[in-house]
Amino acid sequence: MSAPALWIVATPIGNLDDITLRALKVLGEVDLILAEDTRRTATLLRHHGIGTSSRAFHAHSAAGEVDRLVERMVAGERFALVSDAGTPVISDPGVRLVAAAREAGLEVSMAPGPSAVLGALSIAGLRADRFVFLGFLPRSAGKRRAAVEAMGRRSEASVLFESPQRVGGLLEVMAELFPERRVAVCRELTKRFEEVARGLPGALAERFADGARGEITVVVEAAAEEAPELDAEDREDFVRAALAEGQRVRQIAKALAKKSELSASEAYEVVLSVQRDAK
């Protein structure tokens, strides 16, 4: 297999030493580094003594830039794509270049590494067996609220990026829509003033009412798994056990209604029926 024409290289999300040996090797060997912000990338390259040239490639690059870069790779040049922080192609325009390179039959590979998404999940201490990444939410109030409403309906955890100025407002909406769902606000990950604030959205909204500083990743906990509804036989077993414990009929009926699709009156009739049969 030939050497990849395009490398996707993950870079530190804060601490400049959080980069793999393989990533450093790739950055030192390619012909050109395509960077979201060449100034930030230059700081990383200087820190690790890498002299490879870099040029800007970002959302505002000219429409024909992708085609020109692909032509150069077809001619034999090898490039590395990096973002300002973390793994490229996640919330950045790199996907256009990757897609075009693959369509041209070029080999694309990666040097994996830091990710603010996975980093936040790993230290948030919230249920997150499954999660969805939402990037940045829309700026308009209506669309943001709709996005948060959809977030509350999901059973899996949600991870998103938010600006320091808007995080307080976001938490206020969360407190209104799902006040009992725990949230973690992860700020300045891997940096000197790293902070993880966990709790219910109402309390966090007060804490960040005046905004925050630094880059922020928000984790919303996965919904607690609901126990499966009781079928007819299980309902009767549940009632018998509760009666044997001496629980009151109305107390048992209320609990049964929560554990099944029965209405309160239907659950009450089931309890009375089981009670009669037991006599």
Image (cartoon, rainbow, N blue to C red):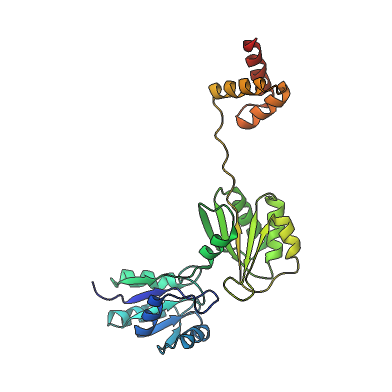
Q: Which residue is drawn at 44% across and 86% down?
A: 55
| Residue most extreme to the front | 245
| Residue most extreme to the left | 1
Spot occupied by residue 86 in the image (x, y as percentages of width and height)? 49, 72
| Residue most extreme to the top | 279
Q: Which residue is drawn at 56% across and 31% down?
A: 229
Viewed as shown, does residue 171 lie left or right of 48? right
Quadrant position of the N terminus in the picture: bottom left
Q: Residue at x 56, y 28 (%)?
A: 230
Spot occupied by residue 166 in the image (x, y as percentages of width and height)? 68, 67
**Residue 121, quarter of the rendered image:** bottom right
Question: How many marks overall?
Answer: 0
Judge whether 78 appears above or below 168 on screen: below
Camera-side residue of 97 and 29: 29
Judge whether 45 appears above or below 112 on screen: below
Spot occupied by residue 142 in the image (x, y as percentages of width and height)? 66, 58
Spot occupied by residue 270 in the image (x, y as percentages of width and height)? 64, 19
Judge whether 128 appears above or below 64 on screen: above
**Residue 243, quarter of the rendered image:** top right
Q: Residue at x 60, y 53 (%)?
A: 221
Quadrant position of the C terminus in the picture: top right
**Residue 143, quarter of the rendered image:** bottom right
Viewed as shown, does residue 227 lie left or right of 6? right
